[in-house]
Amino acid sequence: MSIGNKIDMQMKNLYIILLPLLLLVNISCDKGDAHYYDYNTQAPVFDGTIYEYLESQPGVYDSLLLVLDRLPDLRSKLKNPDSTYTLFAVTNRSFDIALEALNTTRSLTGRSNLYLEDVGLLDLDSMTNRYVINDVFDTEQLMPFIDGKLVTSTKNNYSMHIQFRVLNASGFVGGGQQQLIFSDTNNSIFQRYWQRVNTSVVNVKTKNGIVHILSAGHDFGFSKFTSKYSTQ
């Protein structure tokens, strides 16, 4: 075989190898920005109330359910199919973090450990209600608010703040998972005084509202749990 024929054969083989890759790139490009923007946005739907959703996840929300058993008014709201709320759901790990910090502080002053069954109801009620927002707010509703939106919790018209963002993924800026930043404003208009937490899952639809799940590293009560109960 001549050198020219060998080169032609090598070029043909190279083309055969590269053709599938080129097609894959073209298909990806044809999807456009919308494909990446909608990444992982399929909202789970649960056929029940917010409270029933929590019950359906054994080993995840046991601590929150225990707290709601101590707060019958709030529990009734989340059970009511005729009401509409947005819950920022706190997992067991978030309560563990808060209790560990509390009891470490109490041990330094010679006080015995406290648990969710023991802590005073007034502050527990106030802190828990901050995770429940009047009305329904999903990512689609929050998307237009570039600076986020002030919302009202179900207790004492306390102001919380929600901000929408899309994470980066696969080298595409803003092409990843949709996320919310949930903030306790601490009754301040200055953001430097706010305490924030990110969601891990958004837009779980139920019969009486929306559930957004907070990251497991969140300290229940936005770090107020220890200060409220360290001297109880």
Image (cartoon, helix red, strand yellow):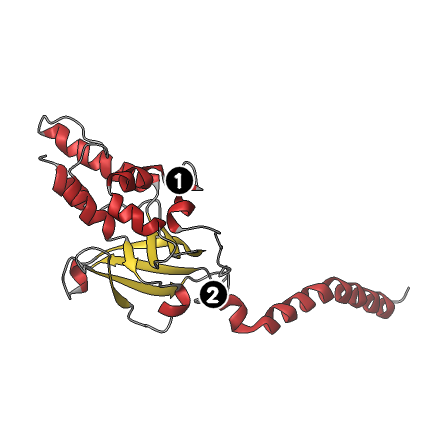
Image side of residue 144 versus residue 20, left or right:
left
Image side of residue 171 versus residue 119, left or right:
right
Residue at 49%, 63% (x, y): give it: 171
Q: Secondary structure at mark 2?
A: loop
Above or below residue 118? Residue 82 is below
Q: Secondary structure at mark 1?
A: loop
The percent position of residue 10, horizontal first and vertical second, equals 80, 64
Question: Which amino acid is tagged 1?
Answer: Val
Quadrant placement of the N terminus: bottom right
Quadrant placement of the C terminus: top left
Residue at 34%, 39% (x, y): give it: 92
Task: Please give the label number shown on residue 60.
Answer: 1
User: Which quarter of the picture shows residue 209?
Assistant: bottom left
User: Which quarter of the picture shows residue 55?
Assistant: top left
Q: Nearer the viewer, residue 45 or 201?
A: 45
Residue at 68%, 64% (x, y): give it: 21
Residue at 14%, 62% (x, y): give it: 188
The residue identified by callout 2 is 175
The percent position of residue 17, horizontal first and vertical second, equals 74, 62
User: Which quarter of the picture shows residue 62?
Assistant: top left
Whether label 2 touches label 1, CB < 8 Å: no
